[in-house]
Image (spheres, rainbow, N blue to C red):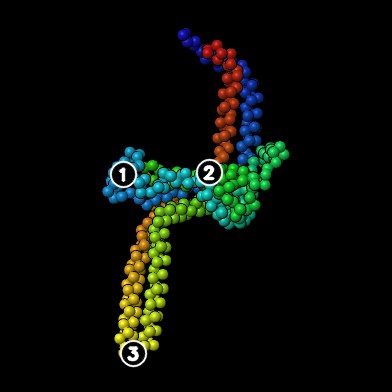
Amino acid sequence: METKRVDYKIVFQKIAERKKLFLKTLPIAFVVSCLWILPQPRYYTCDVMLAPESTEESATGSLSSLASSFGFNIGGVANDAIYPMLYPDLFTSPEFLVNVLGIHINSVDEDGEIIDADYYTYLTKMQKNNWLLQPFKDLFRTIKRWVKPPKPEDMRAEDVTQLNPFYLSTDDYELVTDMSDIITCTVDKKTNVITINVMDQNRRVCALIADSVRVRLQNFITEYRTAKARKDYAYYKNLTDSVKSEYDEAVDLYSQYCETHKDMILQRYISERDKLENDMALKYETYTTMMAQLTAAKAKVQEKTPAFTTLKSASAPVKPAGPKRMIFVAVMLVLTCIGTSVYILRDIIKESI
């Protein structure tokens, strides 16, 4: 197939002849892009970085370190059902996100007004919207509700206490789904370093939510890893309390019997006293054994409690992360130039194809 050559002199000549078209399209693109991007509210981002305690066995520690240097992770799966690579999936769980919605916010907005509400109320009632697009969104929502009236169970909850992760209304489910974009979690496959990123219109709220989510993630991991040890501790605690009450009862019976039969010399009284004394000693031995088991169980809870090192703590960002208004306008102008040039050169393009 013969390839047709493009004469760039003709290309530039055609573009120069229609340069007035650029004087029409570029101002229109500039105005439209400005109207689109300028009303968009600014947003901030805050990152928190954590290094969790390793759960790898010492025998495989060196092998895991060698594998991690090549981007592989071979440790922790056999010992932990929830290992760092699964933490990002936790941030898509409705139960975890509904728990985050209960965070209380006490801050001020950019205008100096006090914010004193839970995160659910803040997201649903205190967010700034694009004033240019908001009327169209409200109109679309009104038409949608008029065509298909929502059922009572599909309406948004009045407050966060009415949220049920097992059964969310349509509006609340959309809110929880959107939160997956607002609050994200990533894990470095080589180092297992956890990075929590939060995006918000208020820089103070952004840092507060990031730090609160960090605490909730740590609490979740701690509760998971210590669940078995805490159950064992509660079991031994109940046994120890039961054995102690039996021992105290045996002491009371022995003391009472000795006081009421102080001067008795009959053998049956002496035998009864010895029986009570032996029973008291046996229960004391059982009690001391259970106390040792309880102490070991308590130490096991502390042993299973993971440690976290905060590599980067939450801090209110100074500069907004977006929207990049100048970049957006510049990109739209470049795209307009390309589109206009393609329109002018459409005949040449058809011939060259």
Q: Residues within 10 Å of mark 1 (few under 14, many from 20)?
A: some
- Residue 129 picture location, percent across and down: 64, 43
Name the amino acid, label 1.
Ser
Mark 2 and mark 3 in contact (Cβ < 8 Å)?
Answer: no
Q: Distance between the residues labelled 1 and 3?
A: 74 Å
Q: Nearer the viewer, mark 1 or mark 3?
A: 3
The residue identified by callout 1 is 64
The residue identified by callout 2 is 180
Q: Which of marks 1 and 3 is nearer the N terminus?
A: 1
Mark 3 and mark 1 in contact (Cβ < 8 Å)?
Answer: no
Mark 1 and mark 2 in contact (Cβ < 8 Å)?
Answer: no
Q: Earlier in the sequence, mark 3 or mark 2?
A: 2
Q: Is residue 11 above or below residue 206?
A: above
Indicate which disc residue 264 carries.
3
Secondary structure state at the residue bearing disc 2: helix
Q: Is residue 17 above or below residue 152?
A: above
